[in-house]
Amino acid sequence: MEDVIKEVAKVLLESKYAVALTGAGVSTESGIPDFRGPSGIWTRDPEAERRAYEVYDIFLRNPREYWERVVSGTSILGDLEKAQPNPSHYAMAEMERMGILKCIITQNIDNLHQKAGSKNVIDFHGNVLKLRCIRCGERYLKEEFDLERIVGEKKVPLCRKCQYPLKSDVVYFNEPIPKDVYARSFKEGRSAM
Ligand SMILES: [Zn+2]
């Protein structure tokens, strides 16, 4: 193990443009379950996986029904907004400050890399703290909207630029990866080659 760590450190020090790809594994130490591991969310509850496939379609068909479900339901991932970074998040943030790591592309939606201090983070599957307009691509902080009140008034949060209904920034099954995120990820990935 010691040899492997030394070897990886050597490769990173010699690298010109290192990009980290992270997924659920990096956040399990922070108490966030993964999806397909031994005690993963889908592994324990296949029915939840089936329902997850419907969310994007519900938003497209009926944004109000989507928001009613979002506001009344509890997240299957637990309370993501209270989760704290763990040593691996902090180590990557430190490596960015040292100039070794240039970018993190993560499929996690938990914002923990940013919470740990990383600056150049691409949330490939979106960020749980944000809302996004699928028409014009604009993003907003969720906290800018009083979602309980809006839903209580039988309304939905609207994009301030184009008035289209907003959804969570989180990318659901069957939903395309946002174009800006896709383009940035490819640019960073190519820089690392
Ligand atoms: Zn818009």
Image: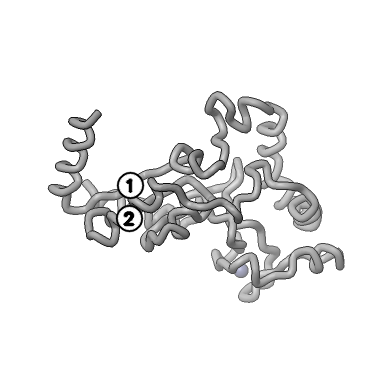
**SS of the residue under disc 1:** strand
Q: Is residue 20 above or below residue 140?
A: above
Q: Amino acid at mark 1?
A: Ala
Residue type pointed to by label 2: Cys
The picture quadrant where one finds residue 121 is bottom left
- Determine the secondary structure under disc 2: strand
- Is 171 above or below relative to 160? above
Residue 160 on image: x %, y %: 65, 75
x, y (%) of residue 182? 42, 52
Residue assigned mark 2: 103
Q: Indicate the position of residue 162 as horizontal and vertical percent values.
A: 64, 73
Toward the bottom, the furthest residue is 161
Between 84 and 53, the one lying in front of the other is 84
Residue visible at 32% across and 55% down in the picture: 103
- Residue ID for mark 1: 20
Image quarter hosting the N terminus: top left
Q: Disc 1 or 2, which lies upstream in sequence?
A: 1
* Image side of residue 96 versus residue 31, left or right: left
Density class for disc 2 (Cα within 10 Å; few <14, some 14-19, many ≥20) is: many
x 65%, y 26%: residue: 44
Question: What's the CA distance linking mark 1 and mark 2?
Answer: 6 Å
